[in-house]
Amino acid sequence: MSAILPIQVLRALAAFMVAVHHVQPDAAVLALQGGASFTRSDLLPWMAGVDIFFVVSGFIMVHASGALFARPGASRLFLQRRIARIVPLYWAATTLFLLIGVAVPAVLNSGAPGIGQIAASYLFWPTLSPQGLVQPVYSLGWTLNYEMLFYVLFAAALVLTRGLVVPAVTLALVVVVGGEVLAGPLPLPFSFWGQPIVLEFAAGMALALLKRGGLQLASPLRWGIAAGGVAILLLGKHLPLPVGPWRDVIIHGSAATLLVLAAVSGLDQGTPSPTMRALAQVGDASYALYLVHPFVIRGLREVFMRAGLYQPVLFIVVALAGAVVAALAAHRLFEVPATRWLRRRLDR
């Protein structure tokens, strides 16, 4: 099995974990309205899916951009491709969120955003919301603000020789985080960029270098590494570490790194199973699943409430399945053609 298929499967699982995290509060509201009981599942730290995404992103940027290293115009071409990949769907989701906020403000949890926050959201610039939180209008975009920082640093480093790209980006991330640790809290946007979660991009890049160097592990060892990553996620909450962002990176980041290592270090195993192919298709649409699932979850919660279906478990199953279907449709009908269209325009 090639390296990219397990990575796509991992992306599918990561996006699904985030969706599981977000569906549970709506299920609790539904249960409360119907007088039913609902106990939240904390079996896994579901938002660790974001950490998996960040390690995967670091890996993919090096793995997929090898031809750009030391190439004239590489920085511009790299940024064009990332903008074409990220901007259309995120801008569409942000715009839809704003339109819903105008039409049905009671459906949303957040207050009315200001013009500055709206502009910063479209520009991937960290800024304060009216509630005093550092987040864009569509709150899931906080991860994309980190991604864009990584892309800019990576693009800038592409002017260097091949062997210096990854060390230069890693050094820049360490300097940003170190500045916040030693002199913080820094003003925005540096206090946001200086959070230790950005070091997970460096972990992914390191895995890509190992893969490029010929890293291959036998299947039993890979399964053992993957099991270790899952075990860390399951048991990490019991570790005696101080609560905070460093705890999350130590636990979630190390688990994500092990899972990605297991995914990228395998030998070619031939034709993948139908299950793996199906999961990989969801992985292809994982960006859409990440951005689309809150709309599906909230919309179906309103449908369930109006229909008098106060059954939280049924709601969770239907909402998660609906989110996957909606993501596959959004990926095929909007994300792919929009990305191709914008990429052609930028290439010109």
Image (spheres, grey):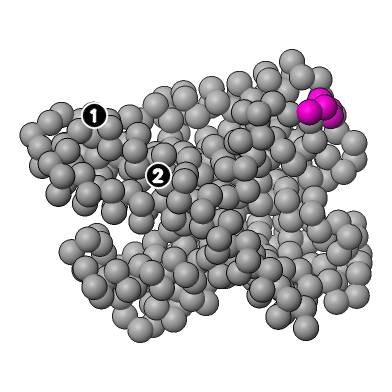
Q: Nearer the viewer, residue 54 or 279?
A: 279
Magenta segment boundaries in residue numbering: 266-271
Please identify the quarter of the rendering in which residue 237 is found.
top left
Say the numbered circle drawn on residue 312. Answer: none
Residue 260 visible: no
Q: CA distance from mark 2 to mark 1?
A: 22 Å
Q: Could you classify mark 2 by the number of other residues whose Cα lies within 10 Å: few (under 14), some (14-19), or many (20 or more)?
A: some
Mark 2 and mark 1 lie on one chain; the one further toward the N terminus is: 1
With respect to residue 328, does 159 lie above or below? below
- Left/right of residue 89 with respect to residue 278 in the rendered view: left
Q: Are marks 2 and 1 in contact (CB under 8 Å)?
A: no
Q: Position of residue 187 (x, y in %)?
A: 46, 73
Q: Nearer the viewer, residue 48 or 3?
A: 3
Identity of the amino acid at label 2? Gly
Residue at 47% across, 62% down: 141
Q: Element under label 2? A: helix
Residue at 52% across, 77% down: 123
Say the numbered circle drawn on residue 39. Answer: 1
Residue at 24% across, 73% down: 103
Residue bearing mark 2: 322
Q: Position of residue 69 (x, y in %)?
A: 88, 63
- Left/right of residue 2 with respect to residue 297 in the rendered view: right
Identity of the amino acid at label 1? Thr
